[in-house]
């Protein structure tokens, strides 16, 4: 039972990734809902739930999972007689160092991106929530809030996410319109 409790957030992250609001749920729900206002309300609720799910995952990841990995490293160091061969070949340090360096950009408060976000404050978080130009703006905002513990930053990120949903709805409308037009042109 303990293993399930320790790893369930990874399952939640997989579900969140598969049920992406922008690419999976928006076109699916759009095919069942005729009212744009109702579609907007449903998608904003789902997109902000997704955002909060990612926030909780990354918060757990940085505050619980990563620190426990450091304890494992210390335990392996303590039990040198068991892992001597692995230690001598450098496998343990290599894996742990790679894992830490992969996410160092997201946890280092001196990183240029953190300084820019701190300068932008709430307005910067709204921008990260709605920015349609660079993939991952919401991810950067969620990682920033999760690693710094800035829960108040989630609110402007959700507002920006609602604006982003308007862009998503408009984009899918254009795609469905073009698809319908091509279908009529080719099969009429």
Image: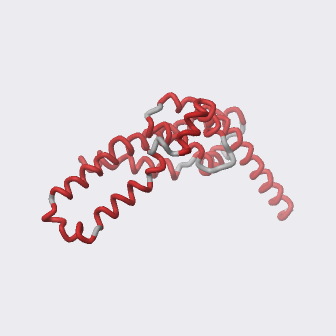
| Coloration mode | secondary structure
Picture coordinates of residue 14 (x, y %)? Answer: 45, 52
Which picture quadrant has residue 182?
bottom right
Picture coordinates of residue 187 (x, y %)? Answer: 83, 64
Which picture quadrant has residue 79?
bottom left
- Looking at the picture, tell me which residue is in the foreground, 166 or 27: 166
Left or right, 102 with reference to 166: left
Seen at 28% across and 47% down, the residue is 68
Seen at 35% across and 47% down, the residue is 8
In which quadrant will I find the C terminus? bottom right
Seen at 51% across and 45% down, the residue is 111
- Looking at the picture, tell me which residue is in the foreground, 55 or 80: 80
Seen at 63% across and 44% down, the residue is 29
Q: Is residue 71 above or below residue 116?
A: below
Picture coordinates of residue 57 (x, y %)? Answer: 42, 43
Picture coordinates of residue 70 (x, y %)? Answer: 28, 50
Q: Is residue 1 above or below residue 35?
A: below
Count of numbered badges drawn on the protein: 0
């Amino acid at each position: 039972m303990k293993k399930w409790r320790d790893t369930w957030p990874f399952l939640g992250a997989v579900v969140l990734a598969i049920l992406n609001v922008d690419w999976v749920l928006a076109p699916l729900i759009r095919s069942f809902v005729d009212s744009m206002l109702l579609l907007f309300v449903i998608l904003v609720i789902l997109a902000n739930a997704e955002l909060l799910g990612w926030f909780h995952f990354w918060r757990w990841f940085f505050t619980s999972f990563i620190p426990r990995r450091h304890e494992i490293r210390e335990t392996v160091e303590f039990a040198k007689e068991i892992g001597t061969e692995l230690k001598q070949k450098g496998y343990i340090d290599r894996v742990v160092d790679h894992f830490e360096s992969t996410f160092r950009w997201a946890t280092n408060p001196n990183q240029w991106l953190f300084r820019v976000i701190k300068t932008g404050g709430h307005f910067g978080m709204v921008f990260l929530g709605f920015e349609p130009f660079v993939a991952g703006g919401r991810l950067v905002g969620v990682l920033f809030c999760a690693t710094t513990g800035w829960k108040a930053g989630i609110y402007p990120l959700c507002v920006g996410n609602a604006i982003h949903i308007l862009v998503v709805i408009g984009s899918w409308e254009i795609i469905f319109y073009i698809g319908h037009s091509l279908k009529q042109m080719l099969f009429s």
